[in-house]
Amino acid sequence: MEPLDRRTIWPYRDGDPGEFYYQRYDHPTGVEAERALGKLDGGEALLFPSGSAAVTALVLAELAPGQTVALAEGAYYGTGALFASLERWGLRFVEFDQTGPPPAGVDLVWLEAPSNPFLTMPDLEAAAAHPGRVVVDSTAATPVYLRPLEDGADYVVHSATKYLGGHHDLLLGAVVCRDAASAARLREFRGRTGIVAAPDSAWLLLRSLKTLRPRLERQTETARELAKRLQGHDAVETVRYPGFGGLLSFDVRGNARRVETSLNLIANATSLGGVDTVLESRSRWEGARVPENLLRLSVGLEDVDGLWSDLEQAIERA
Ligand SMILES: *Cc1c(COP(=O)(O)O)cnc(C)c1O
């Protein structure tokens, strides 16, 4: 493993700052992790202390007061809530159906692939044809399944807290930029605002990226099988699964809370993308925006039959 360098300062050489001189601007472990992630997504990566910090930095750096974001309907609840809290600083946003073309006249198009927890996929071709810049929050797809910069996106956003980190022990975000000038602008803004990720988190990301592909492939295999079995279950109304990745959601006939509290192997917890399977009802956070009986399942690395027997017995108590 690359060494973890926690220093905040590095001495000048012959009176001049070198590549690293103050941690807020750049640090070696962060640069190493950014190089690894940038290679996976085919762009220039910048780390932030959380996915939400990455979203905040990107919209503040990209937009001026009065400009408008078109946000994918049914995207991560926190993104819409964050945009709403930035409205008093002049940010405007409208929601639209990302399976079709974005509305005219917006400055930034914000897609999510696939959306969390509705699992819709964006029409990237229609978005790329829009004159506004395009951001794809690719947290749930990861570069294993999607490289949006190749499909015309300008920026990819990740909550690295989820699949990239993968172990429920790391809070981190990233923006991957298609062009170097945008990356330079965002890096400058990040250094000035101090919205920077710590070396420890960057080091944990480097550790996690080594197993990203095998984790995702195994999670996909298990999630596909669970989606199929859920579809065939009498007590399940709707199953949403895009065909890849470890995230799915389903509506249960009956009481979702009772399913949550009847689990043994699967943890009743929030978040997604880790090696341990978690399930939660999303209406506790999102209210009427989601069906009351919607359960979001993030499939980990446990044995598929063990997961199914736990799910099956819990669903029967709904
Ligand atoms: C969790 C999540 C975020 C926010 O990331 P944090 O690391 O929790 O700040 C953004 N987008 C999506 C799709 C997410 O799932």
Image (tube, grey):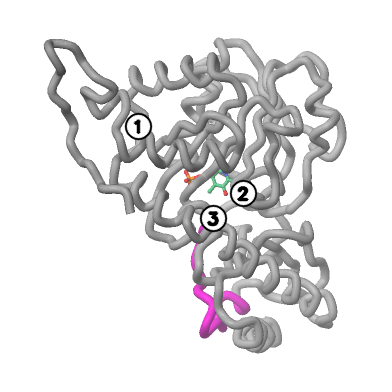
Q: Position of residue 263 (x, y in %)?
A: 55, 82
Q: Would residue 115 appear left or right of 7 to someone viewing this image?
A: right
Magenta stretch in the rendered image: 258-271
Question: Nearest the camera: 95 or 132?
Answer: 132
Crowd around label 2: few <14 · some 14–19 · many ≥20 (10 Å)? many
Residue beneath disc 3: 163
Q: Amino acid at mark 1?
A: Val
> Is 261 covered by the magenta stretch?
yes
The circle on residue 142 is 2
> Is 272 covered by the magenta stretch?
no
Crowd around label 3: few <14 · some 14–19 · many ≥20 (10 Å)? many
Is disc 1 placed on a helix, strand or loop?
loop
Disc 3, disc 2: CB below 8 Å?
A: yes
Q: Position of residue 259 (x, y in %)?
A: 62, 78
Q: How many marks?
A: 3
Q: Amino acid at mark 2?
A: Thr
Q: Residue at x 63, y 46 (%)?
A: 143
